[in-house]
Structures are given as structure tokens and as C-alpha cells.
Image (tube, rainbow, N blue to C red):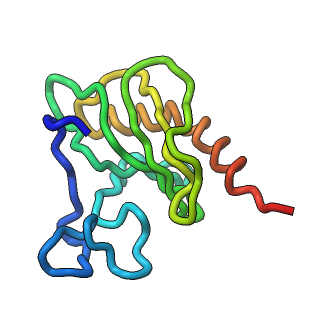
Amino acid sequence: MPADKRIRTDRAAKSADPEPPAFLSRPAGAPVYHGFVVVPETCTDGWCMGVITDYEDADGVDSGDAFVVAPDGSAAGLVWEVGVEPISEILPPDEERWGVYAVCFPHVVRNTGDLASAFRAVLPSLKEIHARVKRPVG
């Protein structure tokens, strides 16, 4: 993550240790992106986007780190930038998440409305990936 990116945390999230923030000291059983913020305005058909880096800037943000939470509660990491490239896998699925993916948003993000619009633009592809990687084996 570039040094100029600010992290957006959930200050209400509980930490397993009183010193570090919750995302560095997740309580037992907490989800992988515990301590970061899910943005309610992005929620669409039970799918929600959470953010790791801040996205609000009047000049526009053209990249960041985020995550998606599926209706089943499972999550995947997102590394986003403005562009037109198809989604690509950065890390494969593991025990905690259904992967980490590079995604391209169609426009810069200045506010929550822009974030929601950009998320909805990539959501159909994320749904397809989720269906493929979460398919039961057998």
C-alpha cells in the first residue's frame, strides 16, 4: 500500500489485545477483514464492499485496497485502480477468504456514491468468481 494512503478502520471493532488496533489483533473467530469498515451504501443484493484505504477525496482517488463480503458472509480482498482490465487473481482462495483480486473501476472515486457505483460495475464479475471458487467439491 502506498505511503500516501490512509487506512480507514472501524473504531468500534474489538481487538484481542488492548494495544494494537482490531485489524492487527483479531479476536478468535473474527472474520479476516475484522477492524475495517463495510460501507453500507455499497450493499447490493446482499453483497457489500468494505474499505481498507480511505476513498473520500475531492480530487478523486484512483486506487485503493478494499474487500467484498458475499451474502454467505465469505470475503475476498480487492486491490482496485481505475482502468479497463479484466479482474485478475492476486492470491488464490485460502481458509479465510475466497481470494484477493485486482479489479478496475470505471472512474475515480471522490465519495461514497462514487464508491458504490464503481463497486456495482465490478459486482457481476465478483459474483461469477465467488460462484466458481465456492462451488462444492464432488
In-front residue for pair 115/2: 2
Quadrant housing residue 38:
bottom left
What residue do we see at 16% from left, 32% from top? 57
**Figure check: 27 above or below 136:** below
**Figure check: 30 above or below 54:** below
Q: At which x and y percent is residue 54?
A: 22, 43
What residue do we see at 49% from left, 46% from top? 100
What residue do we see at 24% from left, 70% from top? 22
**Figure check: 126 above or below 82:** below
Quadrant housing residue 128:
top right
Q: Would residue 80 appear left or right of 132 to someone viewing this image? A: left
The C terminus, quarter of image: bottom right
Q: At which x and y percent is residue 9?
A: 22, 58
In-front residue for pair 133/3: 3
Q: At which x and y percent is residue 48?
A: 45, 52
Q: Would residue 56 appear left or right of 68 to someone viewing this image? A: left
In-front residue for pair 89/47: 89
Quadrant housing residue 89:
top right
Q: At which x and y percent is residue 61?
A: 24, 28
